[in-house]
Amino acid sequence: MEINRKDRIFHELYKVVLLGDAAVGKTTIRKKFAEGVTSKRYIMTIGVEVSTKDVVLTYNGKSRNVTLVIWDLGGQLYFTRMRSSFYQGTSGAILMYDVSNRKSFENLTLWIEEIKSFISNVPLVLVGNKIDLRSSKTSQFISKDEGLKKAKEIDKLHKGVVNFIETSALYGTNVEEAFLLLTREILDFESKKRKL
């Protein structure tokens, strides 16, 4: 039986990379989104870990089936050379920092330099993670306003779309929203490319 073209389900596949310093929660956010699990135990990512997640969303009034292939890249400085080979074919990126770790926030400048070297024109979502730790109200925490300001700075440096969201990977707060935000930006970006 022949399937009518308008009834076909089109499946799209996009590679997404997770970037940021070690211990900002990249693995936790990946596992929470892709597998629905979390762990409070920190285990360093050696090189790269990959997960996939099928997403169905409405985009421009149509249902879209998208598979995200999520590459969780080790954030340690000594993995820089190894990471360079993992960027090929990237459609979008999530750049993360830990709201309780100012050094991870300051190091975003280094990550932007790396991104500009390998994937300068893809959609990017800046994620301030671990908002569950803000309950102690100390001045060391990066505020949402600081995160928004940083996203605007990055937007000027990065040749692509930059959005901002805060998450708690541990509790799942805004985790799905972060990936859906990036997925919509990827679809927009790919749609614009096809029109050129």
Image (cartoon, rainbow, N blue to C red):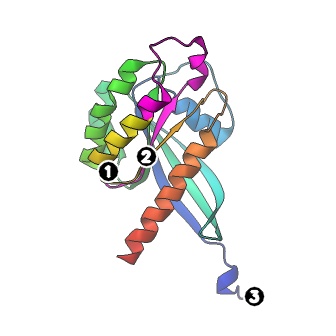
Does the magenta run of residues contain 106?
A: no
- Which amino acid, mark 2? Ala
CA distance for labels 2 and 3: 40 Å
- According to the image, label 3 marks what residue? 1
Of callouts 1 and 3, which one flags the residue occurring earlier in the amino acid sequence? 3
Mark 2 nearby-residue class (10 Å; few <14, some 14–19, many ≥20): many
- The percent coordinates of residue 155 (x first, y second) are 34, 46
- Please give the range of residues in magenta: 119-147
- According to the image, label 2 marks what residue? 93
- According to the image, label 1 marks what residue? 119
- Which amino acid, mark 3? Met
Q: Which mark is residue 188?
A: none
CA distance for labels 1 and 3: 43 Å
Q: Where's the C terminus, which quadrant? A: bottom left
Of callouts 2 and 3, which one flags the residue occurring earlier in the amino acid sequence? 3
Indicate which label's residue lies in the foreground, 2 or 3: 2
Using the image, determine if residue 63 lies above or below residue 34.
below
Q: Where's the N terminus, which quadrant? A: bottom right
> Which structural element holds mark 1?
loop
Indicate which label's residue lies in the foreground, 1 or 3: 1
Q: As drawn, is 36 to the left or to the right of 158?
A: right
- Which amino acid, mark 1? Ile
> Which structural element holds mark 3?
loop
- The percent coordinates of residue 156 (x first, y second) are 29, 47
Of callouts 2 and 1, which one flags the residue occurring earlier in the amino acid sequence? 2
- The percent coordinates of residue 191 (x first, y second) are 46, 70
Cβ atoms under marks 2 and 1 closer than 8 Å = yes
Quarter where residue 59 is shown = bottom right
Q: As drawn, is 1 to the left or to the right of 87?
A: right
